[in-house]
Image (cartoon, grey):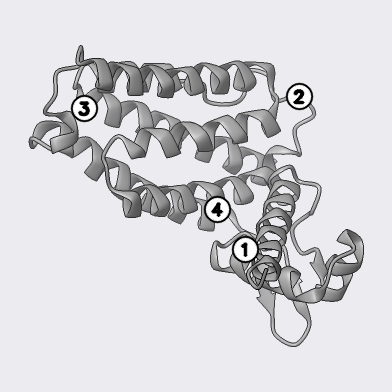
Amino acid sequence: MPGNGTVTRSTLRQQIADALRDEVLAGRLRPGRAFTVKEIADQYGVSATPVREALVDLSAQGILEADQHRGFRVPEYSVTDYRNMIEARSLVTDGMFQALSTGHPAFQTPPEDPRTAAALATVRRRGEEAQRAATAGDLTVLIGYDLRFWRELSALFGNPYLGDFLHRLRVQSWVCAVQYLLRLPDLRGRLWAGHTELVDALARREAEAARALVAASNAHSLALLEHLTNG
């Protein structure tokens, strides 16, 4: 069928992008690591076209940087970059939580409404998994559940553009943070684990409590990165 080649290429593009993103987030592709389209195509045994498209996608998300005429590389973010990412994230989440006190349609139904309760329960389960990973110091698992947690939490507001923007910021934040956090031999007890408290605050419609929890998370992670940089 005429469309088969396009579908296959699109699938490969996404698979390669997902694989490389996971490698960066796991810290296996270190900051400054450079590579070409040909290198990645040879590694995965595919043609150059879906690889190039995947790398361009990752560059647009801030996970990779295009190195003109030389290929792509993993960005080397600074703590100042991380501080700016946190500020940008805070502007988004503060707006989300402000919706609790301004009659946003997503929060006009009572908390006990079956659909609302089910959505919050799903987000809470993601939060529980994220907390377990944070307590155990399992960074890779934590990142996966944390990203899903925030993706599903932002979906409660019914605005896909909001969710996409926040997701991109959080992915970039993790790309930045990983390069510093991997300097610690043991991450147990060092990572923020207040996800379920945040869900519970939102379920109670307590915007200020939710904002305070996110601010505490941001302050905790920034202080940890600053300590690792100075140390």
Q: For mark 2, does the 10 Å Cα neighbourhood hold few (<14), some (14 to 19), or many (20 or more) residues?
A: few
Q: Position of residue 118 (x, y in %)?
A: 34, 18
- In the foreground, 121 or 82: 121
Does the CB distance between marks 3 and 2 fall below 8 Å? no
Question: Mark 2 or mark 4: which is in front?
Answer: 4
- For residue 58, the mark is 1
* Residue positioned 20% across, 16% down in the render: 113
Say which residue appears at 65% left-offset and 73% top-offset. Answer: 2
Which quadrant does the N terminus fall into?
A: bottom right
Mark 3 element type: helix
> Where, quadrant-wise, is the C terminus in this rendering?
top right
Could you give the CA–CA distance between mark 1 and mark 2, rounded to whole angstroms? 29 Å
| Nearer-N-terminus badge (1/4) | 1
Give the structural element (helix, strand or loop) at label 2. Answer: loop
Circle 3 is placed at which residue position?
Answer: 208
Which residue is painted at 27% across and 42% down in the image? 158
Marking on residue 172: 4
Q: State the residue position of label 2.
A: 186
